[in-house]
Image (spheres, rainbow, N blue to C red):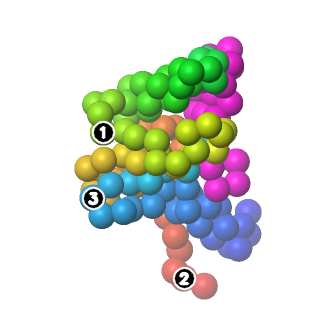
Amino acid sequence: MTLRQQEKNSSDRNSIIRQDGNDLLLEVKIQPRASKNEVCGLIGDNVKIRITAAPVDGKANAHLVDFLAQRLKIAKSRIQIERGHQGKRKCIRIKELGDKRAETLTALGITPTPVSLDR
């Protein structure tokens, strides 16, 4: 992998999760009606998450919040869908995590890569 590819992958990881005050904003793409709940990895600037719930009457959104709370080992009340309530692409606010972007990605099964400043 070239340095440019490594920098692009690192910037992708930085754009999927951002800090907003003491909260983190996570960009996700949801695949409802999956055979199992899982984090599949990165798709562009989103974390792809498969969930078993159907996108009916907010069940998929509630299931997503439950799944993320379990993976991150935090209370469901600290996770809220910021935008994308009726779409597959969502922005998730994770409240009061401070600057724990790397730890959050690791808990979701995504390996954060450090940015190399040497050229």
Tag 3, which secondary structure?
A: loop
Q: Is residue 33 above or below residue 45?
A: above
The local crowd at label 2, few if under 14, some if 14 to 19, many if 20 or more residues have their Cα within 10 Å, is few
Badge 1 or badge 2: first in the primary sequence: 1
Question: Residue at position x 38%, y 54% from top?
Answer: 24
Task: Return the residue at label 3.
Answer: 22
Alpha-carbon distance for marks 1 and 3? 12 Å
Task: Return the residue at label 2.
Answer: 118
- Check if residue 41 falls in the magenta segment: yes
Q: Residue furthest top?
A: 35
- Location of the N terminus (image quadrant): bottom right
The tag on residue 78 is: 1
User: Is the Cβ of the residue at disc 1 closer than 8 Å to that at disc 3?
Assistant: no
Alpha-carbon distance for marks 1 and 2? 37 Å
Residue 82 % position (x, y)? 46, 48
Quadrant of the rendered image containing residue 10: bottom right
Amino acid type assigned to the residue bearing label 3 in the image? Asn
Tag 2, which secondary structure?
A: loop
Which residues, given as a range, are shown in magenta?
30-51
Mark 1 vs mark 2: in front: 1
